[in-house]
């Protein structure tokens, strides 16, 4: 999609950005699915959710094996295999109507990845790149720093990306990311040797998402309020 296309198509789209902290996975999953239904019915709306999760392993549609040490994995409708989410990892969920925005899933993934690469650059990781083959996600040389897994229901997306800022990387030792050994996983902290304030990193990522998708008008909300309230 061209630059003009993003600007023009977001002009008549009511975008809400919901920011959260460390949230329970199942509650956010239920919210995603509710918002996906909403965005399919009301095409000129969209939601972007940013948060961390309590420790959880989620299994995409291509999951073939689950280590016996993993308790209560959550099977979901996104692409990809099994992965780990936990504190220190920023998740960005995109619930956008592709028909209304005149784009496809690759257009959304491309900009989501660019926003993450911008954020990594801001944090001191300057050689990150997007990959969409066997090595899917955001990579720094031979090391994986960000994961990607979307789903599509009717015309709208759900799920999204996960960026490793300073999670417990040993939690990946129960899985094989992209079919590789878990040792390929890295984080911003490992790459730079620095510690980060997650709320500040989340705001940097939000700013880069707004820039890359060229969203000029949007509403801000808190994820905790959304989870305890009613879906619009």
Image: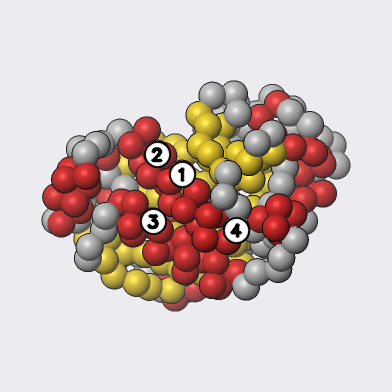
Tell me the tag on residue 209. Answer: 3
Which numbered disc flags the more N-terminal residue, 1 or 4?
A: 1
Mark 2–mark 3 Cα distance, whole angstroms, equals 11 Å
* Residue of label 4: 124
Tell me the tag on residue 113. Answer: 1
Q: Are marks 4 and 2 in contact (CB under 8 Å)?
A: no
Mark 3–mark 4 Cα distance, whole angstroms, equals 18 Å
Res. 89 visible in picture: no
228 vs 34: above or below:
below
Q: Are marks 1 and 4 in contact (CB under 8 Å)?
A: no
Mark 4–mark 2 Cα distance, whole angstroms, equals 21 Å
Q: Residues within 10 Å of mark 3 (few under 14, many from 20)?
A: many
Q: Are marks 3 and 4 in contact (CB under 8 Å)?
A: no
Q: Residue at image x 43%, y 46%?
A: 114
Res. 3 visible in picture: yes
Mark 1–mark 2 Cα distance, whole angstroms, equals 5 Å
Pick whichever, 47 or 26, lies toward us: 47
Discs 4/2, front = 4
Percent position of residue 10, x then y: 20, 53
Tell me the tag on residue 110. Answer: 2
Which numbered disc flags the more N-terminal residue, 1 or 3?
A: 1
Q: Residue furthest right?
A: 69
Mark 1–mark 4 Cα distance, whole angstroms, equals 17 Å
Q: Describe residue 123's horizontal placement relative to residue 206 as left or right.
A: right
Q: Are marks 2 and 3 in contact (CB under 8 Å)?
A: no
Which numbered disc flags the more N-terminal residue, 3 or 4?
A: 4
Q: Describe residue 12's horizontal placement relative to residue 228 as left or right.
A: left
């Amino acid at each position: 999609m061209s630059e003009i296309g993003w600007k023009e198509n977001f002009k008549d789209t009511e975008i809400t950005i919901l920011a959260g902290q460390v949230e329970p996975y199942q509650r956010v999953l239920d919210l995603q699915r509710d918002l996906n239904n909403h965005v399919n019915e009301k095409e000129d709306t969209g939601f972007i959710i940013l948060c961390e999760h309590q420790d959880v392993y989620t299994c995409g549609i291509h999951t073939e094996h689950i280590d016996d040490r993993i308790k209560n994995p959550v099977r979901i409708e996104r692409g990809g295999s099994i992965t780990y989410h936990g504190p220190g990892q920023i998740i960005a969920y995109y619930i956008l109507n592709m028909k209304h925005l005149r784009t496809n899933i690759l257009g959304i993934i491309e900009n989501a990845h660019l926003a993450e690469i911008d954020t990594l650059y801001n944090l001191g990781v300057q050689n990150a790149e997007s990959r969409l083959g066997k090595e899917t996600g955001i990579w720094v040389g031979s090391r994986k720093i960000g994961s990607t897994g979307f789903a599509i229901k009717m015309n709208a997306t759900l799920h999204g990306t996960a960026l490793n800022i300073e999670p417990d990387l040993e939690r990946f030792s129960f899985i094989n990311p992209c079919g590789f050994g878990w040792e390929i996983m890295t984080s911003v902290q490992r790459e730079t040797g620095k510690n980060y304030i997650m709320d500040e990193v989340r705001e940097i990522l939000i700013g880069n998402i707004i820039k890359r998708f060229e969203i000029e008008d949007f509403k801000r909300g808190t994820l905790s309020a959304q989870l305890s309230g009613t879906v619009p």
